[in-house]
Amino acid sequence: MTEVYIVGLEMTPFGKFPDLSVKDLAVQASTGAFDDAGTDIGGIGAIYFGNTSQGALEGQFMVRGEMALRRMGLNGIPVVNVENACATASTAFHQAVNHVRAGVSDVALAVGAEKMYFDDKEKVFSIFDGAWDVHNREGTYNLLRDLTADCVLPDEALSAQVNQKSLFMDVYAFLSRYHMDKFGTSQRQMAAVASKNHFHASLNPLSQFRNDMSIDDVLSARLISWPLTLPMCAPISDGAAAAVVCSKEALSRFDARRAIKVHACELGTGRDRDPALFDQHVSRLTSLRAYDKAGVGPEDMSVAEMHDASAFAEIQHTENLGFCDFGDGGPLVESGATRLGGRIPVNPSGGLESKGHPIGATGLAKIYELGAQVRGEAGPRQVEGVKFAIAENGGGFHGVEEAAVCITILGK
């Protein structure tokens, strides 16, 4: 099987764009990736298109990619539509990489696009109801709630009133409390994650939120689901991102000096497990496969992008990816190790909490950020001497963990 390289990358700004459609965003990202690669759609052998919500919000349940990219002149190019909850875009990238690796064609495009801002907020938040087993909603919710049935909540947790939120913030809150109970993780450590990521986002012109926040600012913000306050939670977002990948044999057609090698791209599915078996988490197992495939380990990583749909999730995944022992994710962020300039900068883009989270584009936005880091083109967010970069992107929920996880390792 051939080696695979990224030769083109693009990401739109993330945020609220009432005048842009999902088609506009998809075309903008795809065109930018083609321009970055120095090619056009005529040089593409296949397209993998990621989107999660257009069916529910606009009724475009099928052939989304074929419709979204039609104006670009598909001219018979195969299009595969991908949906894997919040891991949709990284799964599209995984499919494009394997398409090229298998030799089906020598160049492919992965694109993820999402339009989530609509006037009907109740309909928007209902999207998340379909990201776990719809036949066992109550059973899954009760399983997670019961993890911390004996947890004594502070008064503010009991009095919080939230009109609209994703049910996944309750999921993350239950898991946060469980981690707090097992390891002594604190709400302040979670606030340190959000504060760090808001600072990183202030350096990223494509981020949805660019306001720096102190730890105390995060703690004093509106409570969503204890211990999570609003800045600790990913927002609703519009946006798109795309990547052009090619085989080693096709690399001569592009600027090889800016090519980024895909050392590993592994996809995993959540399992039924005892919640106390932290070392059996799907992100842990999938990252071990990725490290093995790439021939490297956590100690070789220079920078990471993680799925911080909540601040707690980043703490959890620093442990899952082996940057610290289980239970030490809170002290790790508190030490400054995951901040720019630290031992292992995490989410220099600002992460989902601050950069934004258009579900079907998020995974490729991580690839975009890490590609810029490997190329040395991340500007004020640049991590010095990047050799290897790792992305973790989770989607949906099953039992006590994500339903799907994609781990990608990039390098020169």
Image (tube, grey):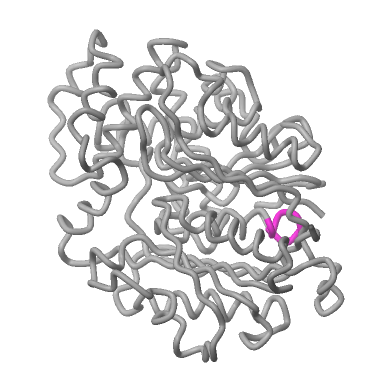
Give coordinates of residue 389: x percent, y percent.
71, 46
- The spot of residue 321 in percent (x, y) is 62, 31
- Say if 144 sits above or below 101 in the image: above
Specify whether 27 is left or right of 298: left
When asked about the image quadrant of residue 334, the answer is top right
Compared to 294, does 32 lie above or below? below
Measuring 36% from the left and 60% from the top, which residue is drawn there? 52
In magenta stretch: residue 184: no
Q: Is 153 left, or right, of 396 in this rendering? A: left
Image quadrant for the C terminus? bottom right
Residue at 81% x, 74% y is 250
* Picture quadrant where residue 248 is located: bottom right
Residue drawn at point x = 50 percent, y = 47 percent: 351
Which quadrant would the N terminus be assigned to in this image?
bottom right
Q: Position of residue 149 (x, y in %)?
A: 23, 12
Query: Relative to residue 192, is residue 229 drawn left or right?
Result: left
Residue 287 falls left or right of residue 412: left
**Quadrant location of residue 252?**
bottom right
Residue 372 highlighted magenta (yes or no)? yes
Q: Nearer the viewer, residue 33 or 190?
A: 33
> Which region shows up in magenta?
371-378
| Residue 181 sits above or below residue 219 on the image | above
